[in-house]
Image (tube, grey):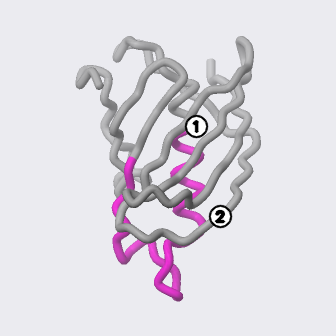
Amino acid sequence: MDENLREKSYAYAKHLGFEMVDWRDGYSKFQLPLEPHIMNRHGSPHGGSHASLLDTVMGYAGCFTGDPDDRQMCWTLTLNVQYLSRPHGKVFIAEGFKTGGGKSTFFAEGTISDETGELIAKGTGTFRYRK
């Protein structure tokens, strides 16, 4: 990944512990260590951490410009999450893919796995570009 394109984490992402791993046209990848502050009362990652991570990777996948001085932003219009499994490892690895859209709206899909390869969750979303 080109380090000039790496954005600093916004406050919420920093609080949760998201780390950008890769970002290019139509694609983004983030990691999230499974730390105690994102666990629910059963000791599993809270469902909101899955949703937040999928929302982030899908949004970034559609907002790549290749120019650090030309930042594209978006709003989430819909977010769907399917919870598939519990993690076996200690890190969420999320990937987002822009799947289509036009000048004002785009669509994306995302996955969360752990470092063991276990598929944890999948998601889809619709996003509107901010002007």
Question: Badge 1, how many Cα within 10 Å: few under 14, some, many 20+?
Answer: many
Label 2 CA crowd tier, 10 Å (few <14, some 14–19, many 20+): few
10 and 22: which one is in front? 22
Q: Secondary structure at mark 2?
A: loop
Element type at marker 1?
A: helix
Instruction: Give coordinates of residue 18: x percent, y percent.
Output: 38, 51
Magenta region: which residues?
31-57
Indicate whether 86 appears above or below 111.
below
Q: Quadrant of the C terminus?
A: top right
Residue at image mark 2: 84
Residue most extreme to the front: 117
Q: Quadrant of residue 70?
A: top left
Image height check: is 14 above or below 46?
above
Q: Label 1, on which residue?
A: 58
Mark pair 2, 1: CA separation: 18 Å
**Marker count (numbered):** 2
Q: Amino acid at mark 2?
A: Leu
**Nearer-the-camera pick, 31 or 72:** 31
Query: Is 64 on the left-hand or right-hand side of 11?
Result: right
Closer to us: mark 2 or mark 1?
Answer: 2
Where on the picture, by quarter, is residue 106? top right
Using the image, determine if residue 11 lies above or below residue 108.
below
